[in-house]
Amino acid sequence: MSSMRPQDILMPQAEGLCCKPGGFHIDPVRPVERAVITHGHSDHARPGHGAVLATQETLDMMRLRYGENFAGSTQAIGYGETIRLGETTVTFHPAGHVLGSAQVAVECGGLRIVASGDYKDAPDPTCTPFELVRCDVFITEATFGLPVFRHPDATGEVRKLLGSVALFPERAHLVGAYSLGKAQRVIALIRDAGYDAPIYLHGAMEKITRYYAQRGLPLGELRPVKGVKKAELAGTITLAPPSATSDLWTRRFPDPLTAFASGWMRVRARARQRGVELPLVISDHADWDGLTATIAATGAGEVWVTHGQEDALVHWCQRKGLTARPLDLVGYGDEDEDVGLAAGETEAAEA
Ligand SMILES: [Zn+2]
């Protein structure tokens, strides 16, 4: 009997990560016959596949974004559920990244490979916590795969926002946050901190935020900002996509103060460049400590590193005696953290 190698089970291809014995691709960037999708962000969940296997929430988000006919057929799978695909079995586990996000464990020939998608081990009131899955091969992202990235506690960041709202009651606070996941997490944290006034929404985040509320998340009173008189917005908080916080749209607010919730706000130059007065370091990705602690805890002897800052993480794994390599997958770079580091900016981050 020949023993199976990990690369016989999952292989990077132009379409994405391909599982030949299972007959599927994970998070394919081009249309394929059968796609297994980890979460609803647009770089992972694309339209046009034959069949899609994902959690109900991810399928719903794809439907909201792309319309009813985003795939030939769909199948919902819950956390902890296992299904057989070809010669493999596939099990979904929570990834803690956004609502419905999953790690995909693929088992074949006695080997277990976990494709974690995007993940974080930090608490998030809007999604099921990350579950550690022991495995032989762990496939990890590396969005914040540099030791300089250590995300502070998100509740402390939200306290800064509320402190500023209290200090400047005549100004409108605009919080730039990606519309799937980050915005709803920020709203939930604001509510947890005891703020119960209405929170205003830019039109682009209404649909997805209402969806989160429908799923039972206590987001409090939400109002569309459209049509509200300028004077009435003094002392209020509005969530908006990051691009909106730097354009003409902001003129409808009295003396707007711009905040931005992103892991990249750890890079001061990045905040300055975007004209962000109040940077909030809140990320839906694991930081350096989260990545390395998770890798160690999976017990995996082999680690494949996908999109982000692969080099430092691969090096860290090798120093720990693990087999590690970058997977050169193209097409990922989270929509929710699209202001990544340009070359040469790491020094600035360290300063
Ligand atoms: Zn993502």
Image (spheres, grey):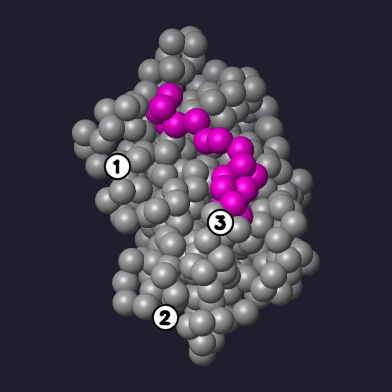
Q: In this view of the protein, can residue 181 be seen by the observer?
A: no
Give the quarter of the figure containing the N terminus: top right
Disc 3/disc 2 C-alpha distance (Å): 21 Å
Residue 76, picture quadrant: bottom right
Write the start and end of the magenta stretch as one range: 145-163
Of 86 and 257, the residue lying toward us: 257
Residue at the spot 68% in from the left edge and 33% down from the top edge? 132
Structural crowding at the residue carrying mark 3, measured as other residues with C-alpha within 10 Å and reported as few (<14), some (14–19) or many (≥20): few
The residue tagged 1 is 269
Disc 2/disc 1 C-alpha distance (Å): 27 Å
Amino acid tagged 2:
Arg
For label 3, the SS is helix
Q: Is residue 254 above or below residue 15?
A: below
Q: Position of residue 314 (x, y in %)?
A: 40, 23
Could you say which disc has been placed on residue 167 in the image? Answer: 3
Of 250 and 34, the residue lying toward us: 250
